[in-house]
Structures are given as structure tokens and as C-alpha cells.
Image (cartoon, grey):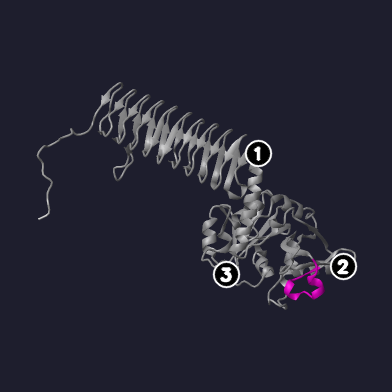
Amino acid sequence: MSLDVVILAAGQGSRMRSRLPKVLHPLAGRPMLQRVVDAARTLGDARLHVVIGHGAKRIESAFAGQGLDFVVQSEQLGTGHAVAQALASLGDGPVLVLYGDVPLIRGETLERLIEGLDHDRLNLLTVELADPSGYGRIIRDGSGRISSIVEHKDASLEQRRVRECNTGILATTGALLKRWLPKLSSANAQGEYYLTDIVAMARCEGIEIDAAQPEHVQEVAGVNDRTQLAALERWLQREQAERVMAEGATLSDPSRFELRGSLEVGFDVSIDVGCVFEGEVSLGENVSVGPYCVIRDANIGPGTRIEAHSVIDGAEIEGDSQIGPFARLRPGTVLARGVRIGNFVETKQARIGAGSKVNHLSYIGDARIGRDTNVGAGTITCNYDGVNKHRTEIGDEVFVGSNTALVAPITIGDRVTIAAGSTLTQAVEHDRLVVARSRQVEKTGWQRPKKG
């Protein structure tokens, strides 16, 4: 039978002190709710129902096109009330209940939790905590069977000594939820409809109750404030750093490594401190990344050296290149093997051939540069006329002198030498020297103006 997943994401998150809905706060580059949705999608062809309330329109907009069924909880009257809002959308088969602010739950854990739901039963995800304060306690009878869950505020002193805690994550069937949820009562310290009260109902009906536990406590850690969010961020970044090191990378300091997407590394990659990787990034063998670089959605070929404070975004680098320091490669940049991009150079929609160099203080945009070409300091491709972008084509073995302006559209042939300080507006054929600057004029006997 098909699986229904109900994700509770209606809370205001007042302790976050933010106008952004809590579940949209990012964790390692992805909204917390997105991480829960992605974990649920590992379970196969599941129907995902998201219960929203505070910031509902922003959440719907953020997840537009993802095929989610949004259900509005106009009043926040507890977890049982929240799940009840989705009852009309649920089938009678397996149902999994998750939380949008418990972002690190793993698909493998959920797979274990939904086992055995081909018949009526209730599976709880529990966790052993050294300090269980604030958590609902799992109460077992003398035979070790789960009899109930008691919320912290309702628990006796003896019950508060129990360390096995409820995570709120559970799996059962839609048929059972449709029978149990209408019977919930708000007669408790919080005045809310607790989803956990279904445990006692299941026990009374003789329904089998089982429990699974996560591999890591952090999988079931909820986020209520920015301190808790930061703690999960640090734990997740350390986990990611250890995976990257296991795959062949050396990190100068794993505590100063930030991955906000996916990163593939070849053998003997070196990453210095303070680097941030976003989107999908791959680093080939023997790539070296200097300190404080930002690399986003890029493929860096083997043997490339990226110097400090460089930003690479949407670029393809074939390999054996040297980038930076303080270089910026923008989307559409493609570098062939052995290219050098130096300090304070910016490229965009630029294809640069093998062995070519753009070493200092230049802008290369909407351009193609051939092989073994040298672009001098201060060179710019003037690609924008205020309305449209235009192309610059530069051939092989060209020497572009410093402080040159190439006014696009323009084509420069092979083996052309351009004198420093030139402004070119017309095409240049192969094997030419071109000088395009005004003649120097000197006047003798000239007097500098003086104030009256």
C-alpha cells in the first residue's frame, strides 16, 4: 500500500526571533523543511502532506512545484490537532509523521520505522537522552512493553527520571489515526491535543506497539532557537568534513570547513581553512584550494591550484590551472588545461583556451580566447552597450598589452600583438601589430594656471 507522510510545519517559532518561518531557516544551505522532505522522498513513491500555519504563503511559495499537498492548521492546538487536519487526505494504509523543525532525520532510520505497517500497529521513534528535560517520557510496564507517553509537564518525579524519550516521530496506519484522533482530549497542562495520547489508545485496543531508535541523537534534535540551529550546523558540518576526509581530502582544520550542498573529491585534494562549498562541486585529484575561497556549482579538474580568497561560481576548469588569489570566475566560465587567472581578474561567459593567461586586474566577459594567449593587466572586454551583450573573439598566441579596451562585437585574429593602452573597435586580421591610442603631445613653455 502507498505511504502517506505528514510533516508538521505550522509553528510560529517565536524563539527564533525572525520574520522568516522557522522551517525555512537554512541548515547547511538547505531549509530545514527541505531536508525533511528530501528524507521522506527516499522512501519511494510517498504522498507528502505538509501541515502549515504561520507563514503559510511563504512556505507554499518556497516549495512550489515540488508536488506537496499543503494543509492549513488555522489554530495551533497541539500535534494531535495538526495531524487531524490532514486526515481527509490520508488513505487507510501506512502513515509516517515527521516534523519540519527536526531536520536531520535520515532515510535509513525512517525505513526501519515503517517496517511492519502492512497490518495495524504503532511504531515509535524513541531516543535515550542523558538530560531528558522537556521531553515526553516513554513509560513501559513490568514486561518492558510501551504503555504510554507522558509529557514532561504532566510527568511525576518518578516518571521524569526515565531517560527514554519520545521524539514525536511515529508510524501507524491511516485507519487507526482516523479512529483515534477524534477521541483526543485537551485536558492536560498545556491545554492541547497531544498526538502521543494515541499510545494509550493503542495499548487499550491491544494494538502492537514497537520502538526504533536513531543512530545519532542529532537525527531527532528539534530546533527552537538559533542556538540549537547553530549546534546542529556544527555537528552536520563535522560529519560532512569527516566524509570528505575519508574520500581523500586533507582539511587544514575540519572545524573551519563549510559544505552547503554536495562535494565530490578525488585523491590528495587539499582544502585550507574557511572555504565554503555550495551547490554541486567536484574537485579532481591533487586540487589545492587556498584559504577563504567560495566555490559554487563548479567542476575543478585535476592538478588545479586555487589561491586564497577566490570565488568560483558556475565554472568548468579542465585541469592544471592556477586561479587567484582574489579571482572571480562567474557562471559560464570554461577554462581549458593549463590556464592562469590571476589576482583581481573577473570572467563571465568566457571560454579560455589551453595555456592562456589573464594575470592581473582584468575583466573578460562574453568572450572566447584561444590557446597560448596573454592578456595584460587592466584589459577589459567592453561587452555591454547598455541594452545588449556582445561577443569578443580572440585567437591563438595573441598578446594583449596592458590597459587595453576591446569594444565588442570584435574579432582579433591569431598571433596579433596589441599595444598597451589601445582601444579597439574594429576587427584585426592574423599576424598584425595594432596600436589604437592617441598620439602623445608635449608643449614647452606651458604655465600651470594659478589661483587669482
Nearer the viewer's eye, disc 1 or disc 2?
1
* Left or right for 412, reference 162: left
> Residue 182 occupies which quadrant of the picture?
bottom right
Residue under label 2: 141
- Of 393 and 245, nearer the camera is 245
Which badge, 3 or 1, comes first in the chain's sequence?
A: 3
**Label 3 with label 1: CB-CB less than 8 Å:** no
Q: Give the percent coordinates (x, y) of residue 128.
A: 77, 61
Point out the image quarter for the C terminus.
bottom left
Three-letter code for the amino acid on which mark 2 is drawn = Asp
* Left or right for 260, reference 97: left
Three-letter code for the amino acid on which mark 1 is drawn = Glu
**Image point 80% across, 54% down: which residue?**
116
Residue span colored magenta:
148-162
Q: CA distance from mark 2 to mark 3?
A: 37 Å
- Of 256 and 8, nearer the camera is 256
**Image point 54% across, 31% down: which residue?**
303
Q: Is residue 362 above or below residue 108?
A: above
Q: Give the percent coordinates (x, y) of residue 402.
A: 31, 34
**Name of the residue lying farthest toward the right:** 143
- Of 130 and 203, nearer the camera is 130
Three-letter code for the amino acid on which mark 3 is drawn = Ser
> Residue 355 occupies which quadrant of the picture?
top left
- Of 202 and 352, nearer the camera is 352
Mark 3, secondary structure of its residue: helix
Q: CA distance from mark 1 to mark 2?
A: 47 Å
Residue under label 3: 14
Nearer the viewer's eye, disc 3 or disc 1?
1
> Residue 104 occupies which quadrant of the picture?
bottom right
Nearer the viewer's eye, disc 2 or disc 3?
3
**Image point 78% across, 54% down: which residue?**
118
